[in-house]
Image (tube, rainbow, N blue to C red):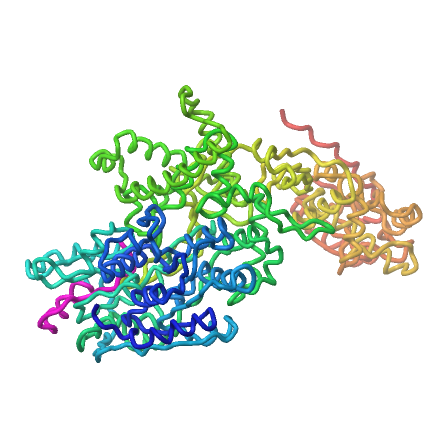
Amino acid sequence: MKPLPIDPVLPEVVAALRERGAVVVEAPPGAGKTTRVPGALLDAGLAGAGEILVVEPRRLPARLAAERVAGERGEEVGQSVGYSVRFEERAGPATRIRFVTEGILLRRLLAEPGLRGVGAVVLDEFHERHVTSDLALALLKSLRAGARPDLGLCVMSATLDAEPVRAFLDDCPRVRSEGRAFEVAIDHLDEPDARPLPAQIAAAVRNALRGQADGDVLVFLPGAGEIRRAGEALAGLGDRSAVVPLHGEMSLADQNRAVRPDSDGRRKIILATNVAETSVTIDGVVAVIDAGLARIATSSPWSGLPTLALSRISQSSAIQRAGRAGRTRPGHAYRLYTRHDFEQRRRHDLPEVARTDLCEAVLALAAFGVEDRAAFPWFEAPPAPALVAAEELLARLGAIQPARAGAPGGRLTELGRRMLRFPVHPRLARLVCEGEQRGVAEEACLAAALIAERDIRERSRAWFGGAGAGPGHDAAADLLELCDLFQQAATARFARDRVRSLGLDARAVEMVDKARRQLVGIARADRRRADRSHGQGQSAPDVARVERALQIAALTGFPDRVARRRPDKPEVAILSAGGAAEIGPRAAGNELNLLVAIDAEERQQPGPGGGPGRPTGKIAIRLAAGIEAEWLLDLYADALQESQELAWNPSTLRVERASRLNYGAVVLDESVAPAPPSPEAARLLVDAAFAYGLERLDEPGVLANQLARIAFVRRLRPDAPLPALEGPTLRDAVAAACAGMIGFAELRGEGLAAILTRALPPEAEQLLRALAPPSLTLPGGRRLPIHYEPDRPPWIESRLQDFFGMAKGPAVGGGRVLLTIHLLAPNGRPVQVTSDLESFWQKHYPALRRELGRRYPRHAWPEDGKTAQPPPPKPPRARER
């Protein structure tokens, strides 16, 4: 075998594991730890009669590593060296070294807590710090401390500081290999490049080919979508170069083609995801082009389901990528970002346990009997809010017992145990279990696969993994519609022409079918064990019943994601958890107001040069299923809340009572009727009256005049039992007046001024009439209203002739305050204002008499006004017909 940098320290690794049972190995990428350490442990007899499990973070490195180790040992994969990953296994009875993914290890621990038949476990690439690897490390440590002290444990890392891991494993030995690397020249951009990413890649590849006489070029891109578009941009390179992709969704044959020398001797341009950073060694690479981006495994903040988020890589990832150019000789790395950008980046990637959904990990701990998950000895404790959120969701899904008074809860339920059978997020496992119960297990498995895998619609592939700006509103999907599209493709035996004619992405459909078949296989096996059969030999299922069952199953998996379209704006849905989200016109629930929003995303503005987008703060639903209110009543009656609310209706001008049945913030049923009289209704009426304007609730000027009368009497008689109707006192008086009322119609019927007066104490009302009468009668019989104003003496007005026969002016306030008189000409215009009528007759009337007599000769103008006979009051003018 070709010597590798790790070889000299292999005896030290073996000795440490033999003596202490655990060891931490530090070796940079390319040192050979993945391919050489497992074999050394096996050859040293440290596996006993059992297997060595080598745990990789992803399927691609597990398959490639197994093939490489098998090749070095001169055999085919599946003999003494094999692998087990999701959807695929190549291993047999003779397999002694088995490469597996972290998920496979966790499920094996769940099935066999003692890891029967396993002599040692190697956790490779631990620096990637997935939640599953953190959890596995803690569980394996616990297993070694209890039932399996003989179990060997080797933790290997490329860049992570191994000291914390060594300390966690009871200060086990630490072995370091320096590896081997040649000098790599690194170029940064002078300034950011705003061109689309494919254009940047094409220019950088051509530059690298000119700068290097031979050797391959490795290009790091975020995902399969960017790889495809970059490949299209490089289509004109010519026959001397071969552009090959490398990502996890490819077949093993295609992956091998990417990592091996080209069969025609051409220079390879390998367009790879971050899978090529550490886990896979690619010989012959002399130049690296780094876009500085990656799709980092995380979870959707909306659903908790696994997703890939477009992010800028950390400094450590950038250093690893550049190092790929210096494995066999000096190389060159071209970074498509500035040095300043590099220096501003995080030094290391944030561990998943600090940034992702913990539901699967918490459910696994419950299955292991760990009831106090917060006290579990994590390698690095997760944030408390994330742990609480996971516990609450699992309780809502029915997977663990909810905490109740006097009982902490948290134990795994029978439903939770059934959910653990399925290697999917607990939400989807709950969906499948509900489908089993309702007789649509296989249809539920399809629905779960469609939700778990990438969108099968071709038009959604412009945004790989749903990142970036995201699809438009018309891209929101109905779960039943996706199921139907998939079934049409299946009926056509997934013929590519038919798949494309349905607007579907063939590769996405293939991945969904793999996931579906895996889930169906588990469901069928359990059904056979229970001696049940559904579907086999039965008549065709009722379509409406199946669809109804699937919608109910979707609700049980996402009970916290119920939404209701706004009646006035159906493209917006109110969410049961609070807030609102956009939903396209083609989404589920067009005919139903209620739906369950299975997946959503925050809208983003596209980032410059293909980088991460800028959030807009708007939530858009991407996948939904219509539901009915009755299902919430049947399944979640405890979560329903009945409420009654009094509110002012500005349309009907009254207080109304709305009776509502709520599921969170979603209103399921509502009825509105006039509110019965109550103190709360009166308070709302008072608030509305002041907002509307008290003056508008009576005849113009009447209320102001009444308030001024009261103020006038209070000035004359400070000891009078009259309230000061202003500010808070006025509000109290209006509130007292509104007692027993609910609307403006009642206030206007009698008039607010009259109502306020009636609410005064009897003695106050009598005093008000005596000292501030509302009107007076002149000698001729005419009745005049008396005007009271805050800053003026009380006053009256009428034609001058109406005051004939009055020697002195009238007074109020018990005769203490003379009224100001506005004397009007026959045309109604004022000719004199006086509060001393006697002096007016003597001094001013004679001159006015002559002037008015010339202007109004038809009117009588006697010489002595104070003794003259006033004219009789005119009768009211008849209303015109």
Q: Is residue 58 left or right of residue 181?
A: right
Q: Is residue 817 left or right of residue 601?
A: right
Q: Is residue 733 left or right of residue 685?
A: right
- The front one of 833 and 13 is 13
Residue, far bottom: 183
Residue at image x 82%, y 49%? 864
- Residue 680, image x, y percentages: 75, 45
- Residue 49, image x, y percentages: 40, 57
Quarter of the figure that contains the C terminus: top right
- Residue 536 lies in magenta, yes or no? no
| Depicted 792 relative to depicted 643: above or below | below
Q: Quadrant of residue 560?
A: top right
Residue 346 appears anywhere in the view: no
Residue at image x 43%, y 39%? 522
| Depicted 206 relative to depicted 590: above or below | below
Residue 232 appears anywhere in the view: yes
Q: Quadrant of residue 206?
A: bottom left
- The front one of 278 and 150 is 150
- Residue 430, image x, y percentages: 51, 41
Q: Quadrant of residue 505?
A: top left
- Residue 56, image x, y percentages: 36, 60
The residue stretch that appears in magenta: 200-224
Quarter of the figure that contains the N terminus: bottom left
Total labels drawn: 0
- Residue 221 lies in magenta, yes or no? yes
- The front one of 771 and 878 is 771
Q: Is residue 628 left or right of residue 780?
A: left
